[in-house]
Image: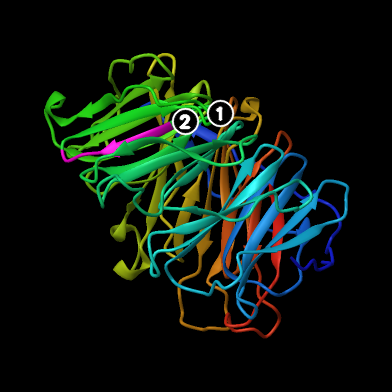
Amino acid sequence: MPLLALALAGGCRSKGKPAPTTVSVDSGGSLAVAVVPDAQAATPAWRTDPVFSAPIAAARMAQGSVVAGLVATQKVIRVVGFPDGKPSWTTDVLPGVKWSEAAELGIQRAADGVVVFWRDSAVGPGGAAVFLGPDGQMRDTPLEVGSAVCTTVGGIAWIAARPIPPAPEHAVHVLARAWGERAGHEVMTLSPDRSPTLVCGTHSVFALADGDDDLTVDVFVPGSAAARRPTLVIRNSDFADEEREHESFTVADDLEIARVGVGGSVATRTVMGDRDASPWRRLKHVLSDEDDLVAIDGQPQRSLFVFTRDSDSACPTPESGGQRVRALDVDRATGADRLVELAPPDCQGQRGPFWIPAGLAEARGPIVAWVERGPGTGDRKVPPISGLTYRVLGPQGVRSGRLSIAADALVDGDCDDAACFAAALLREPGGDGMSPGPIAVVTYP
């Protein structure tokens, strides 16, 4: 694959940090965050040549950052690595792709390198995953994958793009491969009547199969012979109310399941490797009909549920949105939960997507970050994204910050022990969003 030299802009990480805000505690024991300080202009730590179009993706690998994006003029996905203290590298992968509103691009860590994943559901259910080493070298030919793929420290798991004979035509096949293996192997076959999802922990893979009235989980390790017997983790008949939604995430090798009932009640339980699932634990706080769960993740000691609510009455016109952001901060040992106010209604724009970046040292507390968008005036000369806002839920309270970033796309890039990273698709001066631009990596908090 051709290699292109990229110019670095900035040459070092941004050292500017917004001043922290104070927090107060209301009579109900919840944390209320103060107004966000004035935004500070983001200074790129690294920057590519202006050749990219959306979608873009980013990740933090061992001792470096990696970004990827579509080079539409060449119909190729280009991956750029910025190893700490070393020259950048560039690798072109997956030729023949083109822009589509339904296209998905992602990067996940893979041992000492990364896996780049591309899928366009407008073309079909299948996609492709490419293994890259720490210096951008391709370690294998592209792997054909289906609707889901995830990685552990020991390997990769994916849903097959098509049935594998002699299985029934609509059967769902789950495959896996340890990093040291030359080929993948089938771990299990799921019923076509169930909707599958893969969630990876540090070592274990959890294959979730959604049915009409329940949810089952199979657990396996890439490279192992087979999965553990399926465990029934949600059964609607065990609850007094119907289910509104359920979500899941991993903490090390534990799978946390969260169920929200139609009345707003929240219940959680844990699937711990080869042991039975823990009993259900009901949270004290109840979500309203207007609350929308937008992000969920956890650390060994805490789980975080982020939700938004449109507060039309807080703004002069209903079109303003007025989205309020709050979170439930849950102690995983005791089940105690507190309500945290993350942001008051904003009448000047829109918020989202939201994420809880992984990897930052636990002592600093979890971080919630989201994209800030302008009011949408229709002026194509103004990028739709205006900044990145974040909250650090530290042991001494909530700290607020905002980076001013004018961009056409902005994505999470994970964290290391020192900082978190995000990648922004910037616009060249005088551009209207239809021309290629550079991808810049910024750091926070």
**Dot 2 crowding, Cα within 10 Å, few <14, some 14–19, many 20+:** many
Q: Position of residue 82 (x, y in %)?
A: 78, 53
Residue 250 numbered tag: 2
Q: Position of residue 160 (x, y in %)?
A: 41, 49
Q: Are marks 2 and 1 in contact (CB under 8 Å)?
A: yes
Left or right: 73 as drawn, with respect to 313: right
Q: Quadrant of residue 435?
A: bottom right
The amino acid type found where label 2 is placed reads Thr
Please, is residue 364 above or below residue 53 in the view?
Answer: above
Numbered marks: total:
2
Which stretch did the figure color magenta? 206-212
Q: Residue at x 60, y 75 (%)?
A: 75
Q: Does the magenta-highlighted stretch encompass residue 134?
A: no
Please, is residue 383 above or below residue 396 in the view?
Answer: below
Q: Position of residue 438 (x, y in %)?
A: 70, 70
N-terminal label among 2 and 1: 1
Residue in front for this viewpoint, 328 or 313: 328
Disc 1 target residue: 202
Q: Position of residue 128 (x, y in %)?
A: 52, 57
